[in-house]
Image (spheres, rainbow, N blue to C red):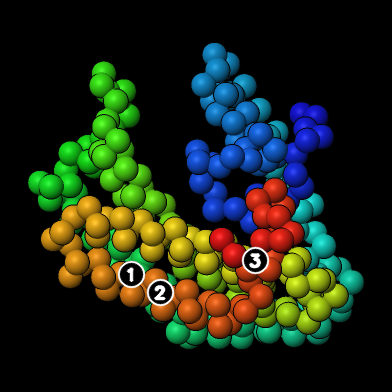
Amino acid sequence: MSVPNPNNIPGIFNWCDRWCERCPMTARCTLYQQEQEDRAILESDLSQEEKMEKIREKLTETLEMLGDSEEEFEMDFDEIDEEEQEEVMHEQEINEIKIDIHPISDLSESYMKESMEWLRKKRKDPVFIPYFDIMYSEEKFPIPPSKEISKVINLLETVQWYQTMIPVKCRSAFNYLADKSFWDDYPVEERGYNGTAKVALLCVDNSIKAWKGLLFWSNNEEDSIMPLIEKLIEIKHMMESEFPDAYLFIRPGFDKKEDESF
């Protein structure tokens, strides 16, 4: 088992957008470092059997690490009887139903599907094809893209990265909120539902900025982009209403005590 880096920030990976390539905190993230070790193993000269054995060992370490980070937030089923377990499971099922029928679930899923469809269509659009070719190419181009091309690619990548994360993070925030009484013992800036809601809002905010950038760059996309921006603004308002203290959450490694907004 590898020795943990003493400079790592415990649990920092619980409150990020998982975009490691753009994260300034990877040098202090245990999860990122373990993933890099996995990649190094797969690219090594070891035999396939040796690679798989090492990957299994690393996976066990990762699961233990994730389990430790969430341990204080989970209920120990060994300490409750069968009837209580059934009651807890029933409450969880009811909570899932409540989240399924919550307007924000439909709205965020609708946004995800529509933004995916937008990107799919633009991959066949002559105006966008050159940007997608560079975006998805695994080859290094002899001449780096210009600042304008890089900016458009960045906007497209941002939209693509967050489109699936928004509904996931919104649902996750409501899952945390279902156990609201548990968090009453924590200060507002440490309550899990506020942290996940803040990440969801960050994803929404970055997406809005990206769509506005694409709208400014292309004068012919107002009819297709504006409805997506409007959906995101509605999601943002709903999340802020449901989680009024979300911006107060202090994400370890990312936020400072005095920060109350992005």
Q: Residue at x 58, y 82 (%)?
A: 242
Q: Is residue 254 above or below residue 205?
A: above
Q: Which residue is mark 3?
A: 260
Asked if 13 appears above or below 51 in the picture, the reply is below
Q: Residue at x 31, y 61 (%)?
A: 212
Q: CA distance from mark 3 to mark 1?
A: 23 Å
Q: Quadrant of residue 139?
A: top left
Q: Residue furthest right?
A: 79
Residue 189 circle label: none
Q: Nearer the viewer, mark 3 or mark 1?
A: 3
Q: Work out whether mark 3 precedes mark 2 in sequence or the reverse, and give the earlier one.
A: 2
Between 261 and 157, the one lying in front of the other is 261
Instruction: Judge from the rendering whether residue 31 lies leftward or rightward of residue 98; answer left or right.
Output: right
Q: Position of residue 204 (x, y in %)?
A: 45, 65
**Relative to 210, is 6 above or below?**
above
Question: Compared with residue 169, is residue 48 higher up or lower down, i.e. above or below?
Answer: above
Q: Secondary structure at mark 2?
A: helix
* Residue 63 percent coordinates (x, y): 70, 47
Residues tagged 3 and 1 counted as in contact (Cβ below 8 A): no
